[in-house]
């Protein structure tokens, strides 16, 4: 991960949860010290849930600064998922208790009006340690929201599919209706809302 000149004054940023039909989109920003001990640190999607959870704790303990932020389902409808993701990323950066000199962002876009030197890196979560760390914090925060929703609405199976549009999730949507936490502008949800399929407790 030495291809980029990332310093201990720089932050990595990544998001989690752009694709699911329910819940917030999350983003995290992480500033790592020059020396850290984070075994097997890589893109969160390449790690087991158990390893992600363990690394998330290590990252929080070792980071110079870290921040997790989100944009709500209502904001996703208001701004669309791309702009809501940019908003969550901006909130994560601004939430750091130390202002980074530069921000490295996973993907091909930089959030507008960040006010900090920033560079987007495609597949940055497997190239830059700080972005890998941010991807893990964003993913574990997103999963925690899904477990909380699973407790509130056990019939939807959020703990299994994490809100993605699986056959089981779509079947639950048809059977039980659309929750307030569902993203009203995502096609399968929108179609059911048009039919008046609301959740009734």
Image (spheres, rainbow, N blue to C red):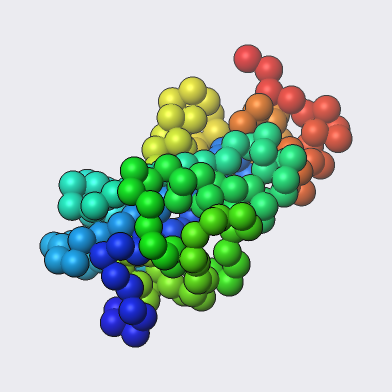
Total numbered badges shown on the rendered structure: 0
The answer to whether 189 is drawn above or below residue 12 in the figure is above
Could you say which is closer to the camera, residue 164 or residue 2?
2
- The image shows residue 40 at horizontal and vertical percentages of 21, 67
Mark yes or no: residue 124 visible: yes
Most foreground residue, 17 or 113: 113
Looking at the image, which residue is at 58% across and 41% down? 71
Which of the 4 image quarters holds residue 142?
Answer: top left
Residue 59: percent from the left, percent from the top? Answer: 24, 52
Question: Residue at point 41% right, 34% down?
Answer: 147
Q: Quadrant of the C terminus?
A: top right
Extreme residue toward the right, this view: 194
- Image coordinates of residue 140 in percent, x first then y, are 37, 47
Please give left or right for residue 200 compared with residue 100 in the image: right
Residue 106 in the image, given as x and y percentages of width and height: 48, 67
User: Residue farthest to the bottom?
Assistant: 3
Q: Between residues 157 and 186, which one lies in front from this camera angle?
A: 186
Name the residue at the top extreme: 201
Q: Relative to residue 8, is residue 81 drawn left or right?
A: right
Q: Look at 53% across and 50% down and name the residue there.
A: 90
Is 122 or 49 nearer to us in this picture? 122
200 relative to 6, above or below: above
Confirm whether residue 163 shows in the render.
no
Quadrant assignment for the N terminus:
bottom left
Q: Residue at x 55, y 33 (%)?
A: 156
């Amino acid at each position: 991960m030495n291809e980029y000149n990332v310093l201990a004054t720089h932050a990595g940023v990544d998001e989690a949860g752009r694709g699911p039909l329910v819940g917030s989109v999350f983003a995290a920003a992480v500033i790592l010290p020059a020396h850290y001990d984070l075994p097997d640190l890589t893109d969160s999607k390449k790690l087991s849930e158990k390893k992600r959870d363990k690394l998330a704790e290590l990252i929080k303990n070792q980071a110079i600064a870290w921040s997790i932020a989100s944009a709500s389902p209502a904001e996703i409808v208001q701004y669309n998922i791309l702009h809501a993701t940019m908003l969550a990323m901006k909130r994560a950066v601004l939430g750091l208790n130390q202002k980074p000199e530069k921000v490295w962002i996973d993907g091909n876009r930089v959030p507008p009006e960040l006010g900090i030197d920033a560079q987007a890196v495609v597949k940055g979560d497997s190239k830059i340690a700080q972005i890998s760390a941010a991807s893990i914090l964003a993913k574990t925060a997103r999963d925690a929201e899904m477990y909380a929703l699973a407790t509130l609405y056990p019939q939807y199976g959020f703990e299994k599919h994490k809100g993605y549009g699986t056959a089981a999730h779509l079947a639950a949507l048809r059977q039980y209706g659309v929750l307030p936490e569902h993203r009203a502008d995502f096609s399968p949800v929108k179609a059911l809302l048009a039919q008046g399929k609301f959740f009734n407790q």
